[in-house]
Amino acid sequence: MPRTTETKPAQPGIVEANRSVWRRFPFDDDQDFQDARRGFMGTAPESVVRDVGGRAVWDLDAYGFLAQDCPDTANPSLWRQSRLCSDHGLFEVVEGIYQVRGFDLSNMTIVEGERGVLVIDPLLCAETAAAGLALYRGHRGDRPVTGVLYTHSHIDHFGGVRGVVTDEDIAGGVPVLAPHGFLEHAVSENVYAGTAMGRRAAYMYGAALPKGERGQIGAGLGQTTSTGTVGLIPPTVDITRTGQTETVDGIRMVFQLTPGTEAPAELNIHFPDHAALCMAENATHNLHNLLTLRGAQVRDPRVWARYLTEAIDLFTGSSDVAFASHHWPVWGRERIVTFLSEQRDLYSYLHDQTLRMLNQGLTALEIAERMQMPPVLERAWHTHGYYGSVNHNTKAVYQRYLGWFDGNPAHLWEHPPAESARRYVEFMGGADEVLRRARQSFADGDFRWVAQVVNHVVFADPDHAEARALQADALEQLGYGSENGTWRNFFLMGALELRHGPVGTPTATTSPDLLAALTLDQLFDALAVRVDGPRSWDADIAVRWNPRGGDPVTLRLRNGVLVRVTGTGPAAADPDVEFTLDEADLRAVLLGTVTPAELAARDTVKVVGDAGRLTELLGHLGAPDPDFAIVTP
C-alpha cells in the first residue's frame, strides 16, 4: 500500500454499502425538498461573509458540489440531508415570520411586529447574523430590531447577537428574552470544559476539512460552524414557566419551558396570531444527540419525550406550521402531529429499550450493536442519525444510568491507551506483523477492525509512518460510508491529522462577552479547575478579596485544592494578603488581563499584606491546551 498524504477513492466494500442505501430508503419521496424550498425569497448577492479584517467566516457557495449526483465516497442518505441543509437564503414561513437558512449551522428566525422585528436565535457569529438581517431587510424593508429571543443556551443560537443589536439598543429598551437558567449554562459550558469541547468540536463539525466529495459535506444538523466573532448580550426577560405569555412589539408568544432536553435551558414558543409553533432544537429533521461527540452532560430522553407529548397537547390544535432553529418547517396540522409524535417515539424507544437490555445484563457496546429501530421510524427521513446516532445515543443512555463501568472487573483497572497499545502490539507479534494482518483486513473491507487494531500500533509508536498511513486510510473509508455527518467528520478529521498533523481549533467559542457574563463564583470555579494539583500539594496560600459593595471572599490553596469561602468565618481566617477593590479590578486580575503587580499598583486598590502571595497562587495554575492530540497519544 503506497504511503501518501493524499485522499483515496472509496474501496469496493464501501461502494457497495453506499449503493445499497439507495435500495433501503424512499429516495423518491421529495416532500422534504418541497418544504425546504417553500417560501424562498432570495439570497445574498455576495457569497462570502467576511469579518472587518476581510477574513472569510462563511461561504454560501462552498457546498455547491452537492448539486451533483452522490459519489461513491459519500453515504447517499447523508448526501441528501446535506443538500437540503445547504439551501441558503430568506424564506417565508407564514406571513410575518421569516427564516434565514444556510448562513450558519443554525437558522435565524425573524418575526415582524408593529414597529420592527423580533430576532430569534441570531446565529453563531456577528458577521453571519448581520448578513442574514441585511438579507431580510433587502426584501422586507429596513425595520429596526425591537426584540431578541434566545431559544436555548448553545452558542450557535446566541453568539451572533451583536450582529443584530447593540448595547445601546438594549439600554434603550429592546428586550432580550431567554429561558430560565440560560446565562449560567451558556457561559459555564464554554469555560469549565470549553477547551476540550472546542478541540473535539473541530472534529465534530469538520470546519478545517476541505469541502468536497472526499471531505466535509455537512454535519447533519447544518453544514458546519462559522468562524467569526462570538458575542453575548445577557437576557433582560426571564421565561420561568410553561404557559407564560409575553408580548414584544405586538407579537404575542406563549412559552413552553423544556429544561434538560436538547439543552439544560431551552423553550418552545407558540405564536397564536400566526398559528405557528417554534420547536427550538427539540424537534428537527434528524435524530439529535443525547450526548454530543464534542462532549456535554448526558441529556434525558425520557424527559425530552414527555415535553414533546406536552407540546403536541398544548399547541398542535392551533398550529398550521412547526419550525425549528435548524432545518426546514413542517406545514399542516396532521403532518405536525405525525412529525412530533415520531420524534417523541424516537427518544422514548431509545430510552426504554436501552434500559430493557441493560437490565438483561448487556453492556453499552452490546446494546449499541443490537439496537434496531421500528420500521416506521427507520423509514421516516427525519428520524435518521445524521447528527446524533442510534449507536452513540444508546451508549449515552447507558452512561446516564450506569456510568462508564460495564461491571466486568477486567475493565475496572485497565492500562491507559499508550501503555495498553505497547503491550497489545508486543502480544500480536510486533508492529510489522500487526500491519501485515491489518492490510489483509483492509483488503477484505473490514475497515472497522483495521481502525481498532492499527490504533494500537499508532499509540505504541506514534511516529510509525506506515501505521499512520494505514490508520488514516481506514478512517477515511469509514467516513465515506457514514450516514452520520458528525461521524464522517470525526473519521475524516482523524485521517487528515494523521496525514498532516494537528490543524487546531477553527471556531473559538470563548469571547470577552462570555467571560464578562461569568459570575464571580463561576470565575473562581474556573480558576479551581486549572490548579496543577500535584505541583501544589505543599502550597498553603490564602488571598482575601474585599470587593466594594460585595461580601469578602477568601481563596485558599491547600492540598492542591483551591477553595473559596464567603465571609470572615473560621474557614477564611488568617489570609496572607487582602485586596480591597472594585469588582472590575477583581475580574481583570482573575481573567489575567492585569498582573498582580499591576493590580497592586492601582490607586483604586488597597493592599494589606504580602501582594506577592497572589503571584504565587496564580503560578500554581496551568494553561489548557486547545490543540491536544486526539488520534495520537
Image: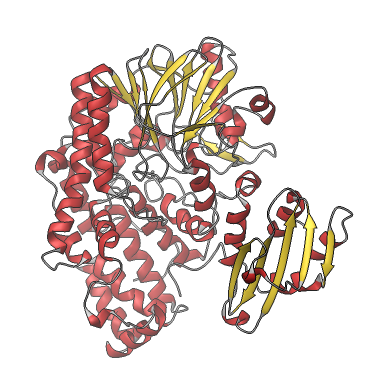
Q: Is residue 530 left or right of residue 10?
A: right
In which quarter of the view is residue 415 placed? Answer: bottom left
Q: Nearer the viewer, residue 183 or 330?
A: 183
Is any part of residue 627 visible from this angle? yes
The residue depicted at 58 percent of the width and 14 percent of the height is: 143
Q: Is residue 528 above or below residue 425?
A: above
x, y percent for residue 178: 48, 34
Is any part of residue 67 visible from this angle? no
Q: Nearer the viewer, residue 484 or 615?
A: 615
x, y percent for residue 15: 22, 52
Q: Nearer the viewer, residue 526 or 575?
A: 575
The residue depicted at 61 percent of the width and 45 percent of the height is: 517
Q: Is residue 537 left or right of residue 494?
A: right
x, y percent for residue 295: 41, 57
In which quarter of the view is residue 504 placed? Answer: bottom right
How many labels sit on residues?
A: 0
Q: Is residue 46 left or right of residue 367?
A: right
Q: Is residue 552 above or below residue 111?
A: below
The residue furthest front is 569
Q: Nearer the viewer, residue 53 or 412?
A: 412
x, y percent for residue 543: 72, 68
Query: Which quadrant, please, contains the N terminus?
Result: bottom left
Q: Is residue 210 above or below residue 28?
A: below
The residue depicted at 62 percent of the width and 71 percent of the height is: 571
The residue depicted at 47 percent of the width and 49 percent of the height is: 210
